[in-house]
Image: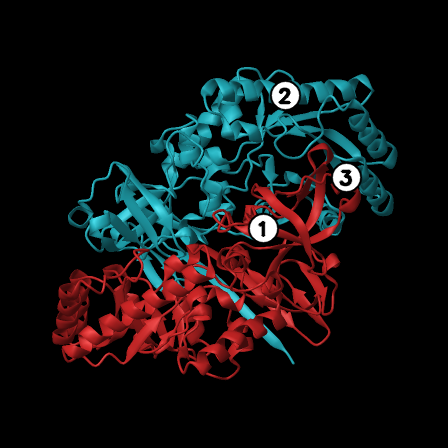
Chain colours: A red, B cyan
Amino acid sequence: MCIYVSYVVHLFFLPTFVSKLYFTMEIEKGTALGSLETPCLLLDRERMKKNFASLEQRLQRFGVALRPHMKTVKSLDVAKALFGEAKVPITVSTLKEAEEFAKIGLTDTVYAVGISPNKLQRVQKLRASGIQLKVILDSVVQAQMLAEYVQQTSDPIQVLIEVDCDDHRAGINPTNKKTILSIAEVLSSGGAALEGVLTHSGGSYSAKSTAQIIAAAEREQKAIVDAATLLRKHGYSIPTVSIGSTPTAYLAHDFSGITEVRPGVFMFFDLHMAGLGVCTTSDIAISVLTTVVGHQAKKGWIIVDAGWMAMSSDRATAGQKEDMGYGLACNEQGAVIDNLTMVAANQEHGILAFRDGRKDVRQRFPIGTTLRILPNHACATAAQHQAYYVIDDNRVAAIWPRFNGW
Amino acid sequence: MCIYVSYVVHLFFLPTFVSKLYFTMEIEKGTALGSLETPCLLLDRERMKKNFASLEQRLQRFGVALRPHMKTVKSLDVAKALFGEAKVPITVSTLKEAEEFAKIGLTDTVYAVGISPNKLQRVQKLRASGIQLKVILDSVVQAQMLAEYVQQTSDPIQVLIEVDCDDHRAGINPTNKKTILSIAEVLSSGGAALEGVLTHSGGSYSAKSTAQIIAAAEREQKAIVDAATLLRKHGYSIPTVSIGSTPTAYLAHDFSGITEVRPGVFMFFDLHMAGLGVCTTSDIAISVLTTVVGHQAKKGWIIVDAGWMAMSSDRATAGQKEDMGYGLACNEQGAVIDNLTMVAANQEHGILAFRDGRKDVRQRFPIGTTLRILPNHACATAAQHQAYYVIDDNRVAAIWPRFNGW
């Protein structure tokens, strides 16, 4: 028995048209959004570039390197648009991302999820292929596992010790000096390259004020510098002192002792970040194009063809001052429609309703009306799509594939 | 300028091994789960077949046809495994699904999302290719649009009028006789084929008891039969009277007047359905394989490499008696670990913790431990993956690709 399955996405980009075999339709370059099949994911190229440049310049002023987290974008075309020919250092959340971005020469890569034994073979393969893949860990057990691996392979793998700055997720509390030093000892006596320390202020995402984000940034900076100082005091060189979250990258006042910053979502931004005050809705570079397919006029409902399959089920704004439901509606041109949010989402149905109780929806948004929905969480919404419909001045300029998977 | 991007998934299935170029690893047939790279999506083939056969037999006893909703599975291999050579009628949530399943001869297809003008061209193309694609609508405006389309194309497109049985989403309340009859009149005078009526008891998903599901089933049956009776009284033939939801399909006692049922999630089942009492956790056919990558021992946290990217952010059990967080943990063999749920999910990190406060996690679940997470919502979790790792007796038997997109 031989089963052979082939699944192909071909995108041709020619001066006058984009032929999308995969979606079995042809799209002229310059097509107006109202002519597209929906739902689809729009990417405003200029907003994205502006967002990137803005944080890049801020960090340059502080003399700290940017190591963007590519989990948000997962697209070689996005990387090329943002970095040009520059071979910038990157952060990834999957080994697949490391593999993909290496195809365009991005090979200085931190894999920012704690390493486990079942991934070592692939890590080795990626490193052997020329990727300077750095792994992270936060336990003596992992350090021992890695030291054994180094012994077997003679590959002096680079390692960052993960530090916990806010009780949010993984990492070692910097006051737990014994564990940090034990890990360093196991790694260096085992032949691994202790490259540095890394932390992530995940807690900053649930801040209730700018002051809280600034406080989170201070904790992040202090925690990582404490860990680096401890290790240096014990003779380790620690070239890399890495922090990273979009809110703290934007609002931190003090990067002293930090060598690099790893934000991701800032490239696109989203309602969650807008709710934190890190951007405004007019900075958000991605949105889901959708069409009105029905109404429940008495209830003031507009039913659209974008449900959680197009938006994701992420409810990141649920705990914020302004709960945006599953997203905030804009007209086809991208202007926010005040108070019109997606209040419910099924697989391929979204229900929009006005938060202020207005019910004149059938007249204002007849069947076939094209709308755009700003996402709560850009990483999650983008992950629901296989391509970006890149727009310049609200017309389709290109279609860029994106990848998922591990 | 000519950009050409090719993105290829090849799966080779040979008697002795599965070569997965896409994931750049080879997997022997019979591989134990602990040897797989994680996260990945497991599909227990026997459970799936049993789930399908069970509802199929129930509906046969009531003499009502099954038109399974393929939005849950999105895989030609799953369809082949369940239907064999039978060309069963199907339900789809996207035109892409209609297109894909037609490749294996499944061409009696209901597209169960209200039709909009920007999809008509593709609908026509699919119908011209041999798919008996039926569309749904719930407004006079849509009926007029469709009638115009029929005039232009001379394609007597089949239409089902969508009825609202529970104030949950789309459809016309059956007491709104005027609208129902106006739609029928516009369609039939325009040359479209009024095929029947359709409803979906979405409200049954939030039932708090079996009695409430049975009541929802009664409402669903009454609403659709009322609409069919009304139309027949006015001379329309109405061959199809279609209902569909997994909870009501399982618990309805009266299918009189119904011709077909359109459940989807029953093929896989999930924690949401288990919470409704429609299945048990041992019926759930899909789970996400994951690896322990860290701990926060004082907090009793186990950190695993499956976050929302692998599980989805669906929180369908949040309103149920037992809130399962982002999923319920099982050991590698699939036995439920009581009270161990995913309490938080980031993109590629999940945090598991015991609901009863046990904290001995580091000893019981050391780094590298393989676990399985049962999903809240099978449709949403499956959508996060590109393939099913099909397991027989907890060993890999095949890898089946799945598709997403529109």
Residue occupying the point 55% across, 71% down: A51
Q: In this view, does A169 lie above or below A318?
A: below
Q: Residue A98 versus residue A93: which sits nearer the camera?
A: A93
Label 2: state its secondary structure.
Answer: loop
> Label 3: chain?
B
- Position of A320 with respect to B32 (left or right) is right
Asked if one can make out residue A2 in the rendered structure from this viewpoint, the answer is no
Residue that mark 2 sits on: B258
Q: Is residue A354 above or below residue B179?
A: below
Q: Residue A248 versus residue A9: which sits nearer the camera?
A: A248
> Label 2: chain?
B
**Amino acid type, label 2:** Ile
**Amino acid type, label 1:** Gly
Q: Tell me the CA gap for discs 3 and 1.
A: 34 Å
Mark 2, residues whose alpha carbon is within 10 Å: few (<14), some, or many (≥20)? many
- Position of B151 with respect to B14 (left or right) is right
Q: Tell me the CA gap for discs 2 and 1.
A: 37 Å
Residue that mark 3 sits on: B157
Residue that mark 1 sits on: A327
Residue occupying the point 55% across, 49% down: A322
How far across and down, in percent of the image, does residue A24 sit? Answer: 66, 58
Residue occupying the point 74% across, 21% down: B175
Q: Which mark is residue A307?
A: none
